[in-house]
Image: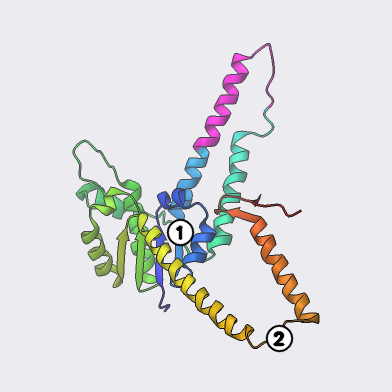
Amino acid sequence: MSSKKAFVFDTNFIFKNNNLPAVIKRLGNGYVVYVTQLSIEERFSQVYVEMQQKYEKLNAIQIDYKGIAEVEIAEAFEERYRKRQAHMQKGYDDLFADKIIPFPKDAQTFKAIWDRVHKKLPPFRAIHGSGDKGFKDALLWITMLRFFKANGEREVVFLTDDKGFLDNVAMLEKEFNDLTGKRIEIKNTQYYESLAEGLKEDTETVLDNSMESAKMVNETRPLPTGKELGEIRGKIKNAIGSICRTILYDGLYDYEAKNFILR
């Protein structure tokens, strides 16, 4: 079993850190990064609503400008959404591979959620008049309990901004340990910033040490020529090219952004 910690985040983390490849790369030395299928499907829902609003605007325009202009819809809403959903899922599959925590939809899961609803167990929030606030959180929690009971690392860090989790950290962390035999830390999403900053400092220390070692070598090593010089030029060219352009990819779509142009 891996000595690394599992790093799992809720959907709200995706909104704050939509460059997920950068998150995985930054945490890669000490963490195995997971995403839940539930969070992915929550993103599907948000995209569905956004697309639906756009199509509703088109329908409104058709009515308002009837007799003046015609609006032709190139692709039906459901078909366009189906393609977008498939593209998003493929993006997450390519990025996370086997590190997507499944979303169970069986009767046993429903029974476990209903039991938490009835007893108002965290992450449900027992607030008068709140109804069944926390249904998604409870589903996410049960999903994680089942997954890490049979799979994954011995230690887990879970990031969320939902009050149902953050107001009941001690109770939920104990439940996780009792049911899985593993340890979980529940943190708010700001924890990633401090964590990333610490990882950045570690990286800078390694780079400083590497530069010092390179300096010592350069003091005695002759300047490169011929084939070696050509290889160095190629590496510099690739490095500059990487700076000039960036492939932005958050598991939903990817595109090239040009930061600089060399002339």
User: Which residue does the numbered mark 2 point to in the structure image?
Assistant: 222
Residue lying at 71% horizontally and 52% vertically, measured from the top left: 261
The amino acid on which the numbered mark 1 sits, given as a three-letter code, is Val
Image position of 133 with respect to 10: above or below: above
Q: Is residue 237 left or right of residue 144?
A: right
Position in image of residue 118 (x %, y %): 22, 47
Residue lying at 23% horizontally and 55% vertically, measured from the top left: 168
Report the span colored magenta.
Answer: 49-72
Q: Give 26 or 182, whichever is nearer the viewer.
A: 26
Classify mark 1: helix, strand or loop: strand
| Numbered marks: total | 2
User: Which residue does the numbered mark 1 point to in the structure image?
Assistant: 35
**Dominant secondary structure of the residues highlighted in magenta in the image:** helix
Most distant residue in the right direction: 226
Image position of 49 with respect to 30: above or below: above
Q: In this orientation, does residue 173 appear?
A: yes
Residue lying at 69% horizontally and 32% vertically, measured from the top left: 74
Image position of 173 with respect to 44: above or below: below
Image position of 199 with respect to 260: above or below: below
